[in-house]
Structure formats: C-alpha cells, structure tokens
Amino acid sequence: MAAQFGRLRKGALNTTVAAVAVAALAASQAPGVTTDDAGRRIATGTQPSPDAAAEDSATGNSPYYTDLPPLNSPNPSPSADTPVTPGTGEAGIPATVLDAYKKAATALQEAKPGCNLPWELLAAIGKVESGQARGGRVDANGTTLTPILGPQLNGNGFANISDTDNGAYDGDSSYDRAVGPMQFIPSTWEWAGRDGNGDGKKDPNNVYDAALAAGHYLCRFGWDLSTQGDLDRAILSYNNSRDYLNLVMRWLEYYRKGTHEIPDGTGSLPSGRSDDSAGASPTPTAPATPGTPSTPTTPTAPGGTEPDGNGGGSTPPKPTPPGPTPPGTTPPTATDTVHHLEDADTAKLTAMAGDTFTEKISTRAETKAGKAVAKVRVRFTITGTTDATFSTGEKYAAALTDSAGEAVAPALKAGEDTGEFVVRATVVGRAIAGLDYTATVTERAADTLTRTSDTALTCTPGGEFADQVEVKATYKGAVADKVAATATLIKSADDPAENDKGPYFKDADGKTVRTLTGLTTDEKGLLKLPKLYADDAAGTYLLRINTAGGATLTVELKVAAAETSPSPTPSESASGSASASPTA
C-alpha cells in the first residue's frame, strides 16, 4: 500500500520535499519480501499478493502514520534551565512508553543476544504505528487509556482478513483489526504476545507487553539487526511496504541521534496516514463472549479532535457495519473453503536431544471434496511440557499453503527434555479440527569410544596410577557431547559385575568406589575419569566405560611390583687371588 505523505504536521516538511525525500529512499533501499521453504522471510524483487503478505505480517499491513521526522537534529535532553514544553519536540518520548521500549530491548539482549535489537527501532515502529501510544496516553501500568484500533481488514481498500479471535482482542467478530500501540493483528498476537510487565497477562493494549512482543517478532529467524539486510527483512515483516521500511528507517536514525523523556500524555499527535484516513475506525461488532474486552471507543485527542484509532486528524463519518452479504455476491476466501487438514507425508519425527529434526512437518489444506487449497495460513504450535522449539527459537510458526495446498513448518529443534511432544497444525481463521503430530526426543548418544592416549596404565600395589583415563565419544563420526556415561571396574571381560579388589576410585570422602555414574562428555566429546588407585592385590584388571547409545570401551590396568635390576656379579679378577709372578 503506497504511503500518502501529503498531510504532514505543522512545522514539518512540505508536501513536495517529503515526496522527493521518500521517493529517493524508496529507490535506494529495501526490496520486498516473501517466504522461503523454511518459513523465513527473504528479500525479492516483487511483492507477494496483498492478502497473503498481510496475513504473514505483524500488522496485517494496516495503515500507519506517515509523518516524517524534522530535518533539524533532535532537541537536546531538557535541563532545569530549558524545560521541554508539553507536546513539542519530536525527540521526546512519553516516559512510560520509553521505559517499555528500553526494558524490551534489555530483555532481548539476554534472550537473543545475537539479534542486536536497538530500543530505538521499537521507538521508530511505535511512532509510525501509533504515534507513541497516541502521545503516551497510558496508565501507570502501561495500558492505553482507550483502545487503539486499526480499520476493519475487510478487503475494502485493505487486506481481507476474516475474524480469527471471535472479537476477543479487537472487539470485532467479523474481521480482524490491528490492535494496540504496536498494532498487532489478533492472529499474530495469539502466538507472538508476551507479558512484558509481569502481571500474568499478554495484553496487546499494554505498551510493555506489546513492545516485548514486537522485539521477539523482529528477532525471529535468527536475524541480526546490526546488519542492514536483516534489519530490512525484519521491518518489512512487520508491514510489507517499501514506504513503511523507509519511514521506519528515518525515525530510527532520528532517535539514534538523541531523545529524552517527556511526561505521559504530552507527546505530539501525528496527522498524516498512509491510507489518508479512508475507512478508519468503523464501529466494530460486539464481542462474542461476555467478559472479553469491551467494544472499543474512539479516544479523544488533546484539543478536542477525534483521532481515528490508527491515523491522524479528525475522524470521517463512521460507516455502518456491513450487513450480511447476499449469496453469490462475494466469492468465499480460500480460508473459507478449507474443510479439513491432512498430513502431507510427514516422516517419523525423531531427534536426539540438542539436535535439529531432519524431517519437517508438512500439512495439506483440503476442501470437503479433498481438493487442495492454496494461500491458506496454517499455524503450527508446539504443545506439552517440552523445551523443543522451531528453528526460529519460538514455539509457534506459520506458513502459507502452496499451489498443492501444502504448508511446511520450519525445522524443529530438540531441547534437552527427552520423550514425546505434540505439534498441532490449525487453520488461521477457521474453526475446524486441528491435526496433531507426535515428535520424539531421545537422549544424547554415542556409538564409539576411543582412548585419547595409548600409554600403558600401570601401578604398583598400594600406589596410584600416574595417568588418568580419558576417552572421546563420537556418534556417526561426529563429536558426541553431553552424553551420559558410567565407568566400572569389572571382574572379567565376560563378567561385567563390579570387582571387589584391585584398582579403585575415591569419592569425595576418600572412600573406595569401583563404579562411577552420572558422568557426561564435554562439548568436545571428551570424558576424563578421576585418578585411579591400587590396593595390595597384584594382577591385570579391566575398566569398562559405557555410554547412552551403546558405545563401550574396555581398558586394561596392570598392578605389579616394580621390577628391580639384578646386583652386578663380581668379576673374576676382583674375587679371585692375584696371578702368580712368573719365575725368573
């Protein structure tokens, strides 16, 4: 959706300068994006179809504010001598909103340090999506004083996304709307939502929750936002528009030059909007279930003008909610035709702890007659008690069905928890039965053990072995790290029972032990056993090491008295008598 930059707040660029600036940026930055077979968004030279791209974005490609940052440098941080006048200074960010951005970025530094998420990026997106929560109109907990809603995504000038939450988040049981200060559509919030303020709830209307959710959303797929390519992809995944990318980048660079805190509720209210306010804030249909969030009311901006929920200026006349569509007038969407999901020949899902599953889940969307349905959004959710995730680091993923009706989930990544868990596939926007896939995580294993040294292991009775036993574990030729192992001094090669004499280990109290359990190979697959000691019984003994997966190694230990050199034999000349002197 092309951005409209004709309406700018007072004191900003005039229309001509703004258009030239944005056109120049659009020519030099960021291609469109699509998804690859792993579910990653990738840059391409063309844009996906509007509805498909909208369903695969954070905002559903909803309208956004188009106000540009000033040409001059940001105002310096206010001091006692130069206080900031409320509502002035674009560099100022409302206190609670600014705190939410910074806390979210700090949390992402710990959770996903490789993402390198700057808080200024959250601020830039928050500015473009909601004008920093409508100038910081939030309560002490960070919840907006009135809901911030985008227009119905009913296909009338926008993407067509039928209701996916029964009105629970957006109060609209007909179509989805973008919700809250970071403008998440309900279907995205359902898996991306986070509890950023620790109140036990995931509320898209709370700026702490929304900022943290936005941070995780931008950091999925292992993107490194310190690189321009990944930064572009992340921003485009939020709203798939080149104009949007360029605008967010402008605000990002502006905030990087400096910003400061201003009181809540005193931030500047934006005016320009990418859709020129068309179709903004129609009255939503009532929530389906009592107790869900109340039907949103239109907030009133300072000065008496009515903002439109996701756009600036005064609100146009509210359109009447659409009534029932006459049969045959509007063809059903692809999602409406899905009757059930079928497994698309997914192989057995098994992986060792810590490994990536080699097989991916593939699901096919079909009509009642069994015909494949393309361009349907399928959500994959990991359920049950497990630390397994998708390769994106999340427990949720979504993919669009292809021309064969098949949607392929990103690869699964096993954690350390062993056992079975379930991945459920569901159709976004359709209340039909989901399809469950069982995945199994087995313990880490090794199939081969070798000593790292060929030095003979010998000791005298009552002494200690000079060398410690060290082995390396591998599995199919690769390093086998974190593999459980045991070591036992056995009676013989044919009798694995623990020996009651010969070499032994010592426990923490110095007591004799001949079986060690709870051993684990390190990250290099190495296992070094404690020092071995010998009792007074001489002989040849065996140490057997076993690992999960069946690897076994038997090591020979010898206990023998030290060999001594024989005393030298006196020479005949030394022990015999002297030779007789010859006679004259």
Image (cartoon, rainbow, N blue to C red):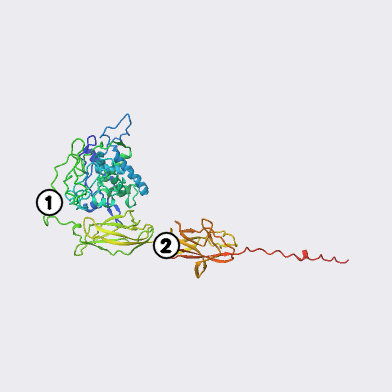
Residue 64 rendering spot, x and y as whole percentages: 23, 44
Please state, as top left, top right, bottom left or bottom right, where the C terminus lies in the image: bottom right
Residue 206 rendering spot, x and y as whole percentages: 27, 44
Name above or below for residue 260 compared with residue 393. Answer: above
Assign a secondary structure to mark 1. Answer: loop
Number of residues whose C-alpha sits closer than 10 Å to that of mark 1, classed few (under 14), some (14–19) or many (20 or more) = few
Assign a secondary structure to mark 2. Answer: loop
Q: Is residue 361 left or right of residue 431?
A: right
Task: Residue at 22% x, 35% y: name it.
Answer: 10
Q: Which mark is residue 445?
A: 2
Q: Quadrant of residue 412?
A: bottom left
Name above or below for residue 220 compared with residue 404. Answer: above
Under mark 1, the amino acid is Gly
**Closest to the observer, 484 or 117:** 484
Badge 1 is on which residue? 323
Which circle's residue, 1 or 2, is located before the other in the chain? Answer: 1
**Closest to the observer, 559 or 311:** 559
Residue 395 visible from this viewpoint: yes
Residue 21 visible from this viewpoint: no
Residue 335 rendering spot, x and y as whole percentages: 20, 57
**Closest to the observer, 423 or 157:** 423
Name above or below for residue 407 compared with residue 20. Answer: below
Q: How many marks?
A: 2
Q: Which mark is residue 535?
A: none
* Residue positioned most to the bottom: 494
Under mark 2, the amino acid is Ala
Residue 41 rendering spot, x and y as whole percentages: 29, 53
**Closest to the observer, 501 or 26:** 501
Number of residues whose C-alpha sits closer than 10 Å to that of mark 2, classed few (under 14), some (14–19) or many (20 or more) = many
* Residue positioned most to the right: 584
